[in-house]
Image (cartoon, rainbow, N blue to C red):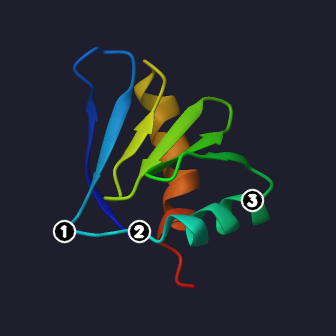
Amino acid sequence: MTYHTLRVCANRGAFEAIPNGDTTLDLPAVRGRLEAHGIAVLDCRVMLIAQMEREVTIGRDGRILIKTRDLAEAERLLETVAPMVGEPP
């Protein structure tokens, strides 16, 4: 899955990555891939919260929220997590 935008959220406390095109993620599959990479995940049914260096929230619609105010850190975390979100089953 590719992302076309990494933008500051309205509250300026996080960055949001927007996927290209409409998507509906299989969150249990995404959770399995994250956990297979050693990332602890809280499953909230409609979203996943990955416990990385910073909290990373993954929505069913493919949006990723990265809780940091540092753009470079957000880009690095997105680069790490995006392939796990979009890997084929």
| Residue at 34% from the left image edge and 65% from the top image edge | 2
**Screen quadrant of the C terminus:** bottom right
Disc on the earlier residue, 3 or 2: 2
Q: Amino acid at mark 2?
A: Leu
Q: Secondary structure at mark 3?
A: helix
| Residue at 51% from the left image edge and 53% from the top image edge | 45
Residue furthest to the front in view is: 45
Task: Using the image, determine if residue 46 lies above or below residue 88.
Answer: above
Which residue corresponds to mark 1? 21
Q: Amino acid at mark 1?
A: Gly
Count residues near mark 1 (Cα–Cα under 10 Å), then give few for <14, some for 14-19, many for 20+.
few
Which image quarter: residue 31?
bottom right
Disc on the earlier residue, 1 or 3: 1
Q: Position of residue 67 (x, y in %)?
A: 48, 26
Which image quarter: residue 24?
bottom left
| Residue at 67% from the left image edge and 68% from the top image edge | 33
Disc marking residue 5: none
Which residue corresponds to mark 3? 35
| Residue at 67% from the left image edge and 38% from the top image edge | 52
Q: Whole-Å distance between the Cαs marked 1 and 3?
A: 26 Å
Q: Position of residue 74 (x, y in %)?
A: 46, 34
> Left or right: 19 with respect to 88?
left
Which residue corresponds to mark 2? 25
Q: Nearer the viewer, residue 22 or 53?
A: 22
Q: Secondary structure at mark 2?
A: loop
Q: Whole-Å distance between the Cαs marked 3 and 2?
A: 16 Å
Q: Whole-Å distance between the Cαs marked 1 and 2?
A: 12 Å
